[in-house]
Amino acid sequence: MTNDPSKLAQTARSLPIALLRARETVMGPFREMLSQSGISEQKWRVLRVVSESGPMEQTAIATAACLMLPSLTRILSAMEKDGLLTRQPDTQDRRKSIVTISAAGQDLIDSHASRSAEITKRLQERYGTEKMIKLLDLLEELTDADLTAAPKT
Amino acid sequence: MTNDPSKLAQTARSLPIALLRARETVMGPFREMLSQSGISEQKWRVLRVVSESGPMEQTAIATAACLMLPSLTRILSAMEKDGLLTRQPDTQDRRKSIVTISAAGQDLIDSHASRSAEITKRLQERYGTEKMIKLLDLLEELTDADLTAAPKT
DNA sequence: TATTGTTATACTCTATAACTATA
DNA sequence: TATAGTTATAGAGTATAACAATA
């Protein structure tokens, strides 16, 4: 019943599982940080994304923050109510609504910047700066890879 | 409001977000496969883990499959009911219960092996075999890293 | 007709605490 | 006292479909 641990199918060699496990390890200290400020992981991702890219439409936020549109609708409503961001109809295409971070939202990010940098620095020390850079490069390439495209011939 | 995209804080350079995005990209084809067989991602992870390691206790499964114990309890009950695995009290420590994959559970894994290998192969072709190996190595190291340990002095 | 976003629904997972049984 | 697992509960996310408004 137990498989040969040397075979390629082992879970540590499964990209989806390996990515999930690594993320769980890394998220630990960040979870602690976020739980203290009462904001959820998902809201934090939305805030980060909108702060980074500037005003943007919801489909783009959903992609960047890895959330489904129905989930995002609910999250944005709550965040707008909490004054972290605003939604305005796009003047050019009125189907769209443009999400903009508020001063309070940016303040929330700024107030976590130093703690966040500290966690990252600590991680870098334990794991190794060069490995971390290499890993981030590989992850970006993987994210950008079009897995449905035809193979090179 | 928009941050300088060159600064270190960009979301693509945030390990938690980068790991999540990469996972979403990779999971696409696997999600399709699993949705066709009517088993959830979480149940699939449990099955993979128990198949790989052989009979094991629940706390170990929870760690390996990245699930909380209360979630695992519910999932295992459903899977046991579906005949995919069995739970038996440990004879040495009766607080523990040992989970063992059933023939039907192993069959489920086996029946997906070729499709799963196909998806992985395709991914490897698009992304590059060497990069994939390097990425898996780095992920394993990260997962095994003890982020709470004291820094080397 | 297709796209953007919202609403509705059923299911599932999270996160925490309280609990039982065992060590 | 501590540990393994279960139960309970509130909150949140997923996944899908149906829908309204707009293009």
Image (cartoon, coloured by chain):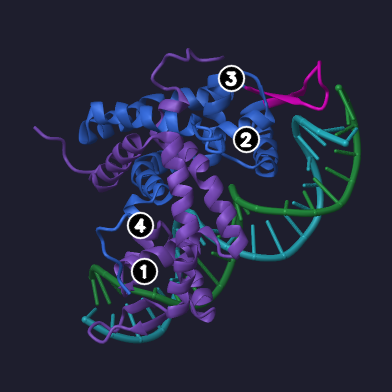
Chain colours: A purple, B blue, C green, D cyan
The spot of residue B33 in percent (x, y) is 40, 38
Q: Are marks 3 and 4 in contact (CB under 8 Å)?
A: no
Give the residue type that dot 4 points to. Ala
Relative placement, left or right, of B58 versus C22 is: left
Please say if A5 is above or below A104.
above
3D distance between C-alphas at marks 3 and 4: 49 Å
Chain ID of residue with mark 1: A
User: Which numbered tag is attached to residue B62?
Assistant: 2
3D distance between C-alphas at marks 1 and 3: 51 Å
3D distance between C-alphas at marks 4 and 1: 11 Å
Element class at badge 2:
helix
User: Which numbered tag is attached to residue B9?
Assistant: 4
Give the residue type that dot 1 points to. Ser
Within-10-Å neighbours for mark 3: few <14, some 14–19, many 20+: few
Q: Nearer the viewer, mark 2 or mark 4?
A: 4
* Magenta span of residues: B86-101
Give the residue type that dot 2 points to. Ala
Identify which residue, B137 or B33, lies in the foreground.
B137
Give the residue type that dot 3 points to. Ala
Q: Which residue is mark 3?
A: B103
Within-10-Å neighbours for mark 4: few <14, some 14–19, many 20+: some
